[in-house]
Image (tube, helix red, strand yellow):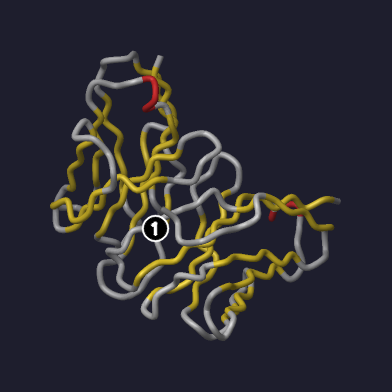
């Protein structure tokens, strides 16, 4: 059983560019959340998708947007990249029903230069 | 903001029990205590969670005080592979509730 998979694993972008990160949830999971983890800090919640809609959002600007597809996979898009967007981006999946734990992917390391 | 406080770091000897404390004095009645850990450069890994009773699984034990204002994660026989950042998180019930991470506690297991 594949767990949560994220792609790419590493990415280098230039300030001002746009980036798209991808996530496939664990089999049987229908809810996807995205987190940003700066160096030395704990992960910070960006937003959550369920039934192809954004259900919750953390304190992140509109430059951060997402999408969920009918197969439950998800994308995180960041526009107009800033140096401060350099971080590890983590995807977590859960089942909507029940009090189940979240499974995390290995993350995408984004470096903005 | 995270509703938990943890010391920044601790260490223990390999083979000994590691007891990781967490304070959550403002926890609400419908909130669970979750523990995750993050080994360097990997995604967080779920360990255990509980509401008010002590819990045990193959990885660890969770002891929650009767007033639910603090808890302790116990790794009964720590190994070098248990070296990681451990996060204590208070989370409302329901899969749609987000995880609010603090800085966690860095556990170093020494040989």
Left or right, B61 with respect to B76, comes to: left
At horizontal 70% and vertical 67% (from top left) the residue drawn is: B75
- Could you say which is closer to the camera, residue B52 or residue A103? B52
Q: Chain of mark 1?
A: B
The image position of residue A70, as x and y in percent, is 14, 52
Q: Dot 1 surroundings within 10 Å: few (below 14), some, or many (20 or more)?
A: some
The image position of residue B89, as x and y in percent, is 48, 62
- Could you say which is closer to the camera, residue B97 or residue A5? B97
In the figure, residue A14 lies in which quadrant? top left
Label 1 residue SS: loop
At horizontal 42% and vertical 52% (from top left) the residue drawn is: A104
In the figure, residue A23 lies in which quadrant? top left
Left or right, B6 with respect to B101, comes to: right
- Could you say which is closer to the camera, residue A96 or residue B25? B25
The image position of residue B104, as x and y in percent, is 57, 52
Relative to B65, is A20 above or below? above
- State how many labels appear: 1
At horizontal 42% and vertical 22% (from top left) the residue drawn is: A111
Relative to A106, is B109 above or below? below
Left or right, A80 with respect to B91, comes to: left
At horizontal 28% and vertical 48% (from top left) the residue drawn is: A58
Q: What residue is disc 1 on?
A: B99
In the figure, residue A65 lies in which quadrant? top left
Left or right, B84 with respect to B47, comes to: right
């Amino acid at each position: 059983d594949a767990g949560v998979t994220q792609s790419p694993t590493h990415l280098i972008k230039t300030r001002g560019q746009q980036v798209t990160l991808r996530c496939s949830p664990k089999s049987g999971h229908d809810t996807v959340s995205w987190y940003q983890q700066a160096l030395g800090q704990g992960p910070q919640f960006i937003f959550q998708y369920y039934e192809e809609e954004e259900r919750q959002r953390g304190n992140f600007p509109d430059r951060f947007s997402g999408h969920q597809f009918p197969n439950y996979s998800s994308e995180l898009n960041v526009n107009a990249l800033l140096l401060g967007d350099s971080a590890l981006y983590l995807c977590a999946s859960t089942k909507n029903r029940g009090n189940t734990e979240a499974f995390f992917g290995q993350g995408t390391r984004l470096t903005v230069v | 903001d995270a509703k938990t406080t943890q010391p920044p770091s601790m260490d223990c000897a390999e083979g000994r029990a590691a007891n990781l404390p967490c304070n959550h004095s403002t926890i609400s009645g419908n909130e669970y205590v979750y523990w995750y850990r993050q080994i360097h450069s990997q995604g967080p890994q779920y360990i255990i969670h509980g509401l008010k009773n002590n819990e045990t699984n193959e990885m660890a034990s969770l002891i929650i005080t009767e007033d639910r204002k603090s808890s302790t994660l116990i790794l009964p026989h720590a190994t070098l592979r248990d070296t990681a950042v451990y996060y204590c998180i208070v989370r409302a019930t329901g899969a749609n509730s987000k995880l609010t991470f603090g800085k966690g506690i860095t556990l170093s297991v020494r040989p």
